[in-house]
Image (cartoon, grey):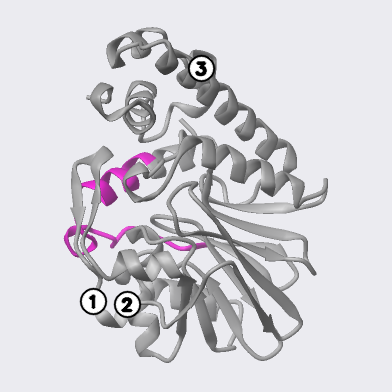
Amino acid sequence: MPRFHRLATALAALLLAAPAAAQDFSQVEIETTKVAEGVYALKGAGGNLGLVVGSDRAFLIDDQYAPLVPKIRAAIAAVTDKPVSFVLNTHWHGDHVGGNEAFAESGTLVVAHDNVRTRLSTDQVMAAFDRTVPAAPKGALPVITFNDQVTFHVGGHTVRAIHIPSAHTDGDAIVQLPETNVIHTGDLVFYGLYPVVDYSNGGSLKGMADATARLLEMSDEDTRFIPGHGPVVIGRQELAEYLEMLRVVHARLEKLIGEGKTLEEVIAAKPTAEFDEKWGQGFLPPERWVRINYQGMAPAKDAK
């Protein structure tokens, strides 16, 4: 199994099983990859981070878990001495917002879509994982929120955050860096893994596919993408493969559900079969991923 699959399996299992305070991050290392001039991807535990370094300040995309903040700071310090003025949360899940409070305490402004602040403000249920996520502390809440999109000017870099409705969640944002032709996808993209679709919090498989199609429309052959999970950099061809998988599986599930098939019948039909070797080796094995999407897509009376 590729290294990023092993990490995703282990760390996502921890994410869903226990709060960050109960997890052991002592062996986690932050790996930094230069994506373009002034643009870096950081990999540790949880979602892949993006770092934009301008002439006067730095801009961080997501911040993983609170216990990792010292290691994240050290990784940032290894490439720049500029202050991190902003951190943008691509959505509300704990492996992307866990460092908010620590960064805010040092003067970094936390930014996110309106729905991210709303969801972080109260307890949230992730039904697919039978988990209730408690509200975040007040100091971890975004202090700047936006509805559609917002643009930052970071010392020579344009950083454009764009809301994508009803995809991984209802508060997703992608981050486009036009000068360097880089896009951070947030958790719209789990490359090499079946993706989490958070139906309890506004997500949908169709929305994931539509969002991925939009990413392709925004890109060209030279665009580099930083996915939310998986390898830290992929290209347009890899994104197109991911979109094909999403569209085919969604169409099959929609057809089977429309025919009135039960969950057991849908699982037995193996709607993901030809994709399982490439995408089904992560923390969501094929049967569980089918189950989550069936329960999210089927009428409530049939979704048990």
Q: Residue at x 31, y 67 (%)?
A: 120
Q: Which label sits on residue 33? A: none
Disc 3 and disc 2: Cα gap in Å? 40 Å
Mark positioned earlier in the residue sequence (3 or 1)? 1
Residue 63 visible within the image: no
Q: Which label sits on residue 137? A: 1
Looking at the image, which is closer to me, 28 or 278?
278
Image vertical order of residue 227 relative to residue 32, above or below: above
Q: Secondary structure at mark 3?
A: helix
Do labels 2 and 1 touch, CB within 8 Å? yes
Do labels 3 and 1 touch, CB within 8 Å? no
Q: Residue at x 39, y 82 (%)?
A: 103
* Residue type of the residue flagged with mark 3: Arg
Q: Relative to 104, is 216 on the left or the right?
A: right
Q: Residue at x 62, y 87 (%)?
A: 57
Residue 190 placement (x, y as % from top left): 51, 42
Quadrant of res 243: top right
Q: Relative to 76, is 133 on the left or the right?
A: left
Quadrant of res 37: bottom right
